[in-house]
Each structure stands twice: as structure tokens, then as C-alpha cells.
Amino acid sequence: MTLQRIFWLAASLLVGAALIGLWQYIADARLVSPVFLPGPDRAWDALVRGFAAGDLEWKLLGTVERMIYGWLLASFVGIALGALIGISPTARAYLGPMLEFLRPLPASAIIPVAIALLGLSDSMVLAVIAFGALWPMLLSTIHGFAAVEPRLYEVARLLGLSHWEVIRKIALPNAMPDILAGMRLGLTVALILAVVGEMLASRDGLGLWILLSARSFRAPDLFAGVILLGSIGYVSALILGAVESRVLRWRGH
Amino acid sequence: MSSGAAPRSRFDWRGFVVPVLLVITAQVAAVVTHLQSDSLAAPSEILVAGIEALMDGTVLRATRDTLIMALSGLAIGVAVGLFLGLLLGLSRIADRLMEFSIEAFRPIPSVALIPVAMLVYGFGYRMEISIVAFATAWPMLLFTRSAVGSIEPRLVEVSRALGFGVLARVWKIILPAALPRIFVAFRLAVGIALIVAVTVEIAANPYGLGYTMMVAQQSLRPGLMFAILIWIGLIGWFLNALMIWAQHRLFGPAAMTAVQL
């Protein structure tokens, strides 16, 4: 990290702090009603109080757990199915148009169907998360496998590699950037659907917590929950980014 | 699978085999088992329910509500995102100063704002519009920033040499040069607007297609529920196709690169 980089980072942190200061000023001066906008001090207090009381971490954990389980499920199914479809031109010709048609469908529109089939249960929420996160992964995996240089397959045939070896040694590494991009998008979708699912099915988690806080006009709790949800998004993107740069190191960026 | 990499040249019947077979299988299964269900419906029932709902206006009214809210939110989000993206793309200093604040705000999932908007606006148009605006502003901001930031520096030099003011420079040089990539962001934002609008309606707001679908589920009318699901899918598909067509028309095949966020 160069000196210049550190300077700009510090400067941007200062700007962030100034914005929080501005938020505090707006709240203190009551430019916006405190019913809607608690100051950062009150939101921070609510955050600390929630963790001290020992129930906020369980809500946080509940949401994270839901998000990760659904996402993992979607990853396994999405990558496996995507590899099968992507590697075969015939499967792409038969299934591709249908998948393209379904791509712009909002994943949340499947929620009423899931409620009708599974009721307002944990498995409903999990199914919705997995289904929603599946699409970006499936489509980008198909794209990744379909875009492998055909001559690589020819080389593989000359080397006498088995079908499984072709997938593992040639197709998978080549499709990896696409798969990881899909997984990143899938994780965002998983967090969104975890929150919506909790709100609808009243499952204990941050999504339900912020909804109940809003209904009972506990704005500081609401903002604390929103901050926590933002942190989940931030940390998970950070982790995936680190994994991505490690896995794709061989490409030499 | 890149969306719209090339205009679809010739009709490929193979894409229709699987969906048609699925529909026929579902119909046969429903008839054979004498399906009487609160959660599933035969394709024929879905079709009948869909036509009825279209004729009596419920679906059309709900579509109007959803589209008004999605498009108003889109307009606000696009304007804000475009403005901030231009600002940050033009000024390296502003970009670096805002780096932390943007990175801190961006990961907030848009649905987390549903309760906030409920608290401020109650239910209704404004609540949903504000959430759609928040969600669509981000891709516009990020794409515009990078599109403006990566403009050929000599173009900017030329505009300086010609003695253009800032406004003329933006209007005559920068916007036209960055427009193809900004339009890609707009296409993404259109899709996001519909997704977020429907999500807000399903989660909270008692208006529009999402809510109508929830009511159909709660009143145990699976035919209507599936009909609206398919209708939402058609709208999404149509908007996407419209945007791809417009992109192709405006910028030609060179601009049709696949995008993934």
C-alpha cells in the first residue's frame, strides 16, 4: 500500500465520518422527525443494547444461516446442472430458450407458490432462497461451460481424457470466472430473499426484527437492523472477493 | 447464454419441446389424478383463470399499479445514479473521497429498506417508489462512473482545446462517448425495477401484481395465482426484449456485449 493510497483512504474515511456527523446534526436539530430518523448515537445504542441483551446475535445468526444454507444448496444444484447443460450443445438447444425466458422473472414472485405448497415454514423460506439464488448460478455456469475454447476439447480427446477428467481439468477451470460471478450474484439474492422470507413467514431473524421494529415505531432498532444487514452484505462480498482472487490467481491479473 | 448476443436469426423448434412437454405432462397428470388442490392447478385452469382475470380488469389494474411504481422509481433512481456517476466519473478527487461512503452504503439489501419506507410513508405508491429508486440508482451510478472514467483521455483534451465549458463537455463529448455502456446499466436497472416492485408488493405493500398474487394464494385460488406468476414472467420477458431491441437499434451489434453484475 503506497503512501498516496493510505492518504486517500483516510480522506474517504473522514468524508464518511463527516456524513455520519451530518446525520447526527440533522437528527439533533430535528430537521426530520425523530420518529423516522434516529441519530447515529441512538442507532448505535440500540445495536449495543441488542447484543448485550443477547438476542440480536441469534437473529443475526438466524439470517446468516438461512442465507448460507440456501446459497450452498443453490450452488451445488446450479453448478452441477449448469455443467451438464453447458457442456452439451444438444441440452443447450433444448433447454436454453426456456431458461432465457425464465431469467427476467422476479425470484420473489415464486414466494406465493412456495407458501401454497410448503406453508409458512422454515423449509418454505429455505426453498425460496435456494430457488432464487439458483438462477444466476445456473445461467452463468452454463455460459461458462459453453464458452470454453472448442480446441481445448479436441486436445482433451487426443490426450484420451475421460469425460470426468475433461470436466475437472479443462472445462471447470475455464468456467470458473463465470461460476464465481454467478455465486456472488446468488449470494446477494440469497440475502434479499432471506429477509423477505423472514418477514412473510415470521421466522426469527433480522428481517422479521426490522419489520416488527417499524410496526412498533422503534426506529433506533430498525436502523440498527438495517446496519447489520448492510454489514452482512459487505462481509460476505469481501469474503467471496478474497476467495475469487485466490481461486483465479492462475489467470495472472 | 449471453442475453441477446446476436439477434435471433432462425426459428429453432428444439427450444419449444421441453416447455410443451411439461405443460402436457402437467395437464395429463391433473386429469388422471382428478386434481382438487388448494396449491396446484391444471394448465387449463390456469389459462381460464388468467383469461377471466384479464377480462374483468383485476390483472390490468394491478399491472398498471406495479408499472407506475416501478417506472417512477426507475426514473428517480436513474436520474440520481446518472448524476452521481457523472460527478464521480469526472472528478478523480470526488471519486476517491466518496469511496468509503459508497462501499459502506452499497451492500444494504434494498428489501431492508421496506420497513424504513413503511415507517416514513406508510403503505402506498411513495413507499414502493422510494425503494425502487434506491435499488436502481446503484447500477446506474457504478456503470456511469466506470464508463465516464474510462473515456479516451484525448477526447477530453480535445474538448479542452476547443474551449468547451464543463456543461458543453459533458453534453457534447462525455455523454455520447459513455452512452452505450450507460444504456447497459439502464437495461439492468429496468429489470431490477420490476423485480424490486414485485418483491415489495409481496412482502408488504397492498398494491399491484405481487399483492394480487398473494391474495390469490390466501384465498386458495391456485389457478389465478399461477396465471399472475406467468403474467409477471411475460412482463419481465417483454421489458427485457424491448430493452435489447432498443440497445441494438441505438448502438448496433458492437454494443451488444454480455453483462453480468
Image: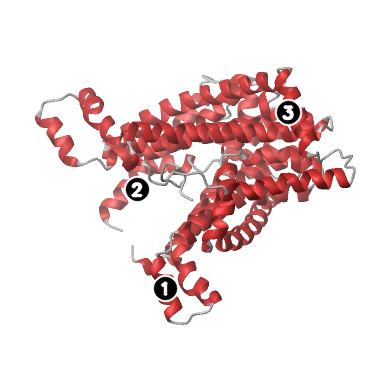
Q: Which residue is mark 2?
A: A9
Q: Which residue is mark 3?
A: B50
Residue A105: x, y in percent? 60, 39
Query: What residue type is disc 2 on?
Result: Leu
Q: Are marks 1 and 2 in contact (CB under 8 Å)?
A: no
Q: CA distance from mark 3 to mark 1?
A: 50 Å
Q: Are marks 3 and 1 in contact (CB under 8 Å)?
A: no
Q: CA distance from mark 3 to mark 2?
A: 56 Å
Q: Residue at x 56, y 29 (%)?
A: B131
**Label 2 secondary element:** helix
Q: Are marks 3 and 2 on the same chain?
A: no
Q: Which residue is mark 1?
A: A154
Q: CA distance from mark 1 to mark 2?
A: 49 Å
Q: Residue at x 87, y 47 (%)?
A: B32
Q: Is residue A201 left or right of residue A57?
A: right
**Label 3 secondary element:** helix
The image quarter in which residue A90 lies: bottom right
Rate crowding at label 1 as few (under 14), some (14 to 19) or many (20 or more) other CA atoms within 10 Å: few
Residue A190: x, y in percent? 62, 48
**Label 1 secondary element:** helix
Which residue extends farthest bottom?
A: A160
Tell me if residue A114 comes above or below residue B250 in the rendering: below
Query: What residue type is disc 1 on?
Result: Glu
Q: Residue at x 53, y 49 (%)?
A: A185
Q: Are marks 3 and 2 in contact (CB under 8 Å)?
A: no
Name which of mark 1 and mark 2 comes first in the sequence: 2
> Which of A117/A32 is in front?
A117
